[in-house]
Amino acid sequence: EQTQIGFIGLGAMGKPMATNLAKHFTKTLNPVFKLHIYDIVSAPLDDLYSSFPNLIIKCTSPRDVASKSTVIFTMLPSSPQVQSVYLDPSTGIISSSSSPPLLLIDCSTISPSTHLSIKSHFPLSTTFYDAPVSGGVLGAISATIAIFLGCAPSDPLLPLLHTLLSPMASQIIPCGGPSLGLAAKLSNNYLSGTITIACAEAMDMGIRAGIHPFTLQKVFSAGTAQNRISDVFNPVPGVCPDAPSSKGYKGGFRVQLMRKDIGLAVDMARTVGAMNVLGVSTLGVYAAASEATDCKDLDSRVVYRFLGGMEN
Ligand code: NAD
């Protein structure tokens, strides 16, 4: 039977990911293959359709996508949208009256427990993976994101998952089992979110003491503080010319999304009984920056500005 793919949620990440899938399947020239897409906003549906008119089928609901697809990807903001797309009794994927899709792959960042609860509503014949991603919008566009898969390295479907995911990603890491892709993603964002604040504070103290920002970055890179935030996404404007901080904190990873992810990570730490000394203060900084008029909607590294860092 022909694989028919669905893609629901065509925002900052989902649209370029779906575009890369469409490009890949256009190249492999499979005439029967179609990509069935849905979003509550019509603009990205129209854009994708006009780029790939022979490939794209615009759908009217998640249920409509599910009735035509054997594999469905979702890339939605957070838990309420994921719950409604999968479980809504009249429009959700679960309400499709045709035989259920074989493979569901949720790339959204939500809590591991919410993922497991949604998964439990589907019959065992439906395989459901968490597959959150890292690498940002630029990574989604250039197909260089990393995907953290909620499955074992020995999962028999891994070769198929590789075929489906590799047009969108440069690294696919099986994290051990169901919901562990999400646990890995939240651990990663907890670390990058706390490092960002530590880097902002360390840069500010060095600059105020009289060290040039370029010299400080070089010192961290040569010393034990070496890290990717300082090297590539330095929060101080001007240090990394291509980073969002040097472009008025435009583009990048929105501070509200970091707030959401740190909140999910703090909840997860509590659930699994992990130590979490930095969680409350980190969450407090991102929550307050998400509300501040000169920071909200900007890249998460704007915490440097929020905390009073020197900007010139
Ligand atoms: P986004 O808000 O840009 O896109 C979400 C899309 O989902 C929008 O197009 C929206 O219209 C659509 N949508 C919302 N509710 C819907 C519904 N009920 N049915 C169908 N479509 C619906 O968000 P994004 O930046 O693409 O992020 C998506 C997910 O990926 C989030 O969980 C985020 O945390 C995660 N993520 C984002 C980035 C990033 O840099 N932006 C990086 C890694 C992971």
Image (cartoon, rainbow, N blue to C red):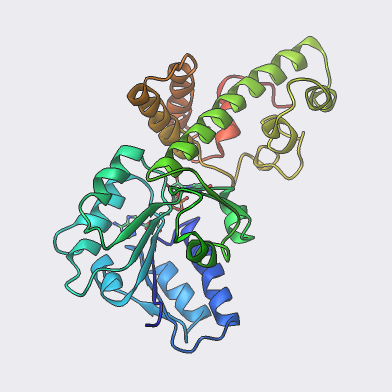
Residue that extends furthest to the top in the rendered view of this protein: 209
Res 205 quadrant in image: top right
Is there any visible trace of residue 87 in the rendered image? yes
- The spot of residue 122 in percent (x, y) is 22, 57
- The spot of residue 123 in percent (x, y) is 21, 59
Q: Quadrant of the C terminus?
A: top right
Q: Residue at x 85, y 24 (%)?
A: 215
Q: Is residue 41 above or below residue 266?
A: below
- The spot of residue 219 in percent (x, y) is 83, 22
Residue that extends furthest to the bottom in the rendered view of this protein: 31
Direction from residue 98 to residue 143 in the image, left or right: right
Q: Residue at x 49, y 17 (%)?
A: 278
Is there any visible trace of residue 234 in the rendered image? no
Q: Quadrant of the N terminus?
A: bottom left
Direction from residue 118 to residue 175 in the image, left or right: right
Q: Is residue 222 above or below residue 81?
A: above
Direction from residue 136 to residue 243 in the image, left or right: right
- The spot of residue 161 in percent (x, y) is 48, 62
Q: Residue at x 36, y 25 (%)?
A: 272
Q: Is residue 231 above or below residue 220?
A: below
Direction from residue 131 to residue 128 in the image, left or right: left
Q: Residue at x 57, y 57 (%)?
A: 140
Res 99 quadrant in image: bottom left
Q: Nearer the viewer, residue 22 or 159?
A: 159
Res 284 quadrant in image: top left
How many marks overall?
Answer: 0
